[in-house]
Image: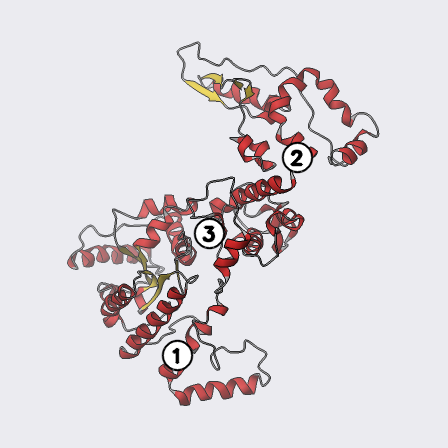
Amino acid sequence: MEAAQHLVTLGPSAVELVDRTMIDLSRDIPMFVKTVNAFVRGAPDALLLVEFSGEDQADNIRKLDALEEMMADLGHPNGVVRAEDPTFQKAIWEVRKQGLNIMMSMRGDEKPISIVEDCAVELKDLAEYTRRLTEVFEKHGTTGCWYAHASVGTLHVRPVLNLKKDLGAKALRAVAEEAFAMVREYKGSHSGEHGDGIARSEFHVDMFGQEMVDLFQRVKDILDPRGVFNPNKIVNPPRHDDRNLFRFDPTYEERVRVHSPIETGFDWSHWGSFSQAVEMCNNNGACRKTDGGVMCPSYRVTKDEKDVVRGRANSLRLALSGRFGNDALTSDAMADTMKLCVGCKACHNECPTSVDMAKMKTEVAYQRSKHHGVSLRDKLIAYLPRYAPWLTHVSWLANLRDQIPGLPWLSEQLVGLSKDRTLPKWHSGYQAPKAAPETNRPVVVLLSDTFNRNFEPDNLYAARDVLEALGYEVIEAKPHMGNRPVCCGRTFLAAGLIDEAC
C-alpha cells in the first residue's frame, strides 16, 4: 500500500490489490487455479495488478519496463511478473473480477462480511489506514480480506466473522464504528464506490452531518412520498447489526440442528458439514449465464430459477433450516427441484465458489431412499451393472420392449419407463481386450463403462483401434471383482444408493 502512491505516477489505467487470502482460495477453485499458479510467483502476502492500456503498445512496454525499475527502487527487485499476452491478461483480470465470489468461497461459518468494504482515503494515507485497520481486526479477534482499487485508495476490505453467532454481530458493529471513525479522521468516505444500503446508512449523520441527512430525507419525500421505493435506506435506517435482517437469523442454527439431524451418505467434512456446503452458494448468479461454458444446462433450457444451481441451493438451505416444514429434504417437492440436475458438475468447475450441486443432488437422493425406499424404476437403473452381463446373453429378449406394440405402455404403467422414449438397444458379445499386457509396447488401460460395454461397444472398439494405431497395447481392467462387476458406480449414485456405489 506504500507503493501504490508511487506506481500511479507512471500513469497506469489500473492498480488493483489481490491479497494472500484471495490467492489461496483461488487455488482451491478449479476455474482459477491454473491462472493463479501462472501469474503468482512465490508466496506473497499480497500483490498488485498494474495495467497499462494505451493505444501505443511500444509506450505500454516502456511503462512496464519503468514499473520494474520503480519496484526495484522500492525494495522489490524481480518483483514484476510481466503479462503481455492478451489471453493471459484476460485470464488474470477474470480472477480479479471474481474477487468477491472467490472471497466468499471461504469454507466454514466464518465469512468475509461487507461493512467497511469500500471506505476511501487519500493515497498518501492508504498504508497507515491499512495498518491501523488490521490492528482493529486483530483487536476484535479476526482478520480481514483485502482486494480491489489501490490506485484510488478504495480497498474492498471485509472482516472475517461468523454472523450466525451474536458475538460475530457485536464484532461487526465494533469494527464498523472504529473503521468509520478512522476514515473521518483521514477526511475520507465510508462509501467510496458502492451504495450505502443498510450497512452504512446508520452512520450518515456522523459522516455527512444532520443538515445533509435532512436534505436526503427531503429529496426522498419529494420523489417517493409514500416510501415504497427501497424504504429505510439512506434515511430512517434500521441498525445494521439487527440479526433479524441477516441471511442467518438468530434461530437459524437451532432450526438446522432440530430439522436436519441427518446421517449423510457422503463425507462433507471438507466443507464442515452438508449444510455448510449448501451455504457456499452466495447467490452470485454465475449459474444463470447463457453464454460460454456449460453451466447450468437445465437452466439454459427452462430459464426457471428453480432449475438453476442457485435456486436448488436456496431450496436446500431453506429445507435444512426447517423453513419448508418437517421432512422437506426428502419431500416430493425437493425431488422435483433436483430432478433436472443432470449431474454434470459444471457448477463445481465454473461456479466461483465451487458449489457442487451434483454431489448435493445425490445426497438428497440418498436421504430420500432411506426415507421412502427405492422405486422399481430406479432399481432397474441402479443395478444395471449387476445384471447387464447376464442379460446380454439374451439381448433379443431385452430388446423386445420396443418391438411389440403395447409393451412401452405397459412398462410405463408397471415400472415408470416412459412409453414415449425408446430404450437403448442391448448388444451381445462385447469382445474385451486382455486384462494383462502381452507385448513390450506402452500400455493403456481402457476403462469400459457399463453403458458402452452393453449398448454401444463400437465406441470402445474405436478407441482401441486409435490407441493401437498410435503404438499402444490396450488392456482392460478386470470386468469383475470377486462376484461383483467392476463399475464406476454412477448408476447407483443416480438412485441415491451411495453405499452400493462404493
Closest to the camera, between mark 3 and mark 1, is 3
Instruction: For label 2, count other residues whose C-alpha is less than 10 Å away and answer few (under 14), some (14-19) or many (20+).
Output: some
* Quarter holding residue 304: bottom right
Q: Which residue is mark 3?
A: 276
Distance from label 2 to label 1 (Cα)?
A: 58 Å
Question: Which residue carries the number 2 mark?
Answer: 378
Give how far across and how far down residue 122 sits, in percent: 28, 73
Cα separation between marks 3 and 1: 32 Å
Mark 1 Cα shell of 10 Å, populated few (<14), some (14-19), many (≥20): many
What is the CA distance from the residue labelled 2 to the residue labelled 3? Answer: 29 Å
Residue 141 sits in quarter = bottom left
At a point 45% along the width and 51% down the height, the residue shown is 353
Alpha-carbon neighbours of circle 3 within 10 Å: few (<14), some, or many (≥20)?
some
User: Which of these two is toward me, 140 or 460?
Assistant: 140
How is the rendered protein coloured? secondary structure
Mark 3 lies on a secondary structure that is helix
Kindly indicate whether the residue at mark 1 contacts the one at mark 3 (C-beta within 8 angstroms). no
Which mark is on residue 257? none
Q: Is residue 253 left or right of residue 372?
A: left
Name the residue type under label 1. Answer: Phe
Considering only order in the chain, which callout, 1 or 2, is on the residue closer to the N terminus?
1
> What residue is shown with label 1?
203
